Amino acid sequence: MMTYKTIGIIGAGVIGRKLFDYVNGLDGTEVAYVLVSDREKYAGDTVLAPFVIDDAVQALERRADLVLESATPALLSQLGPDILAHSDLCGFSCSALADSAVEEAMHAAANRSGRRFFVPHGAVLGLDGLCDGREQIEEVVITTTKSGASLGQAADARGVLFEGTTREACARFPRNVNVHAAIAFAGIGFDRTRSIVVADPDTKAMRHHIVVSGKGLEWEISVSSQSLGGVTGSYTPASAIGSLKRILGRDTFANA
């Protein structure tokens, strides 16, 4: 099992701050940096401010053992290969992988260095089953329902905004469909996985409904959590900490 003495964090939003608080409280592990776009925004935060940096080159030069990305798909695409040259990387903005060039660059960097890239399950469940059942699974459809505002649309938007491949969905809604990307990556791929994005102006919840079918199997998984504002649901921070605990090997009872 890999021992991580230093951990870098990219992003200090809802998820990034939860990750920071957890890592900063660990014995034997130090926060190497928290990379943000504007360090002045955090000047008044006496706990976080000493770790904040807004220079990506300077941050990556610190070569943390593990980097946790919780910012944007664009930033993960930009920095991921350079991070993987020296560090393991957990990317919460995994819709970046829908760009085949980005995925190939990540694979190439990891293969050269021997470092690992982790795709967290985010706001849904069951990625282990999708991975284990790849050879039997024939169809995966995921429907996400959110308010129009959280999807970057008009507040009164209603109905199906998108239906197509998950690769296309990630291009259209890069900050809203990380769940779709994780499912596609774990399962039958970005081109065979189908995505549906629905706007509902009357909901404060973020709902994901996954239907999986194949040779001798059929699953349905529904997950709903209240919005914390923006694109993050109330379950996602807890999920992020759970994923980090498994990476660090700090779960007393681990899934296998």
Image (cartoon, rainbow, N blue to C red):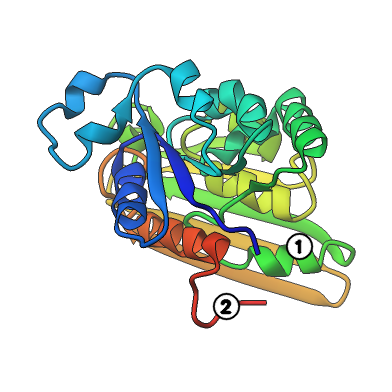
Instruction: Check disc 2: other Cα within 10 Å, few if <14, some if 14-19, many if 20+.
Output: few
Residue lying at 23% horizontally and 33% vertically, measured from the top left: 50
Determine the secondary structure under disc 1: helix
Which residue has dot 1 on it?
131
Front-most of residues 111 and 181: 111
Which residue has dot 2 on it?
254
| Image position, residue 218 (x, y; %) | 74, 73
Type of amino acid under label 2:
Ala
Front-most of residues 178 and 15: 15
| Image position, residue 245 (x, y; %) | 48, 64
Residue lying at 50% horizontally and 54% vertically, measured from the top left: 122
Q: Which numbered disc covers residue 221?
A: none
First in sequence: mark 1 or mark 2?
A: 1
Q: How many marks?
A: 2
Residue lying at 64% horizontally and 34% vertically, measured from the top left: 86
Q: Quadrant of the C terminus?
A: bottom right
Q: Is residue 165 visible?
A: no
| Image position, residue 24 (x, y; %) | 31, 52
Residue lying at 19% horizontally and 29% vertically, measured from the top left: 42
Where is residue 27, by image quadrant?
A: bottom left
Front-most of residues 197 and 103: 103
Find the residue positioned furthest to the left.
Answer: 44
Type of amino acid under label 1:
Cys
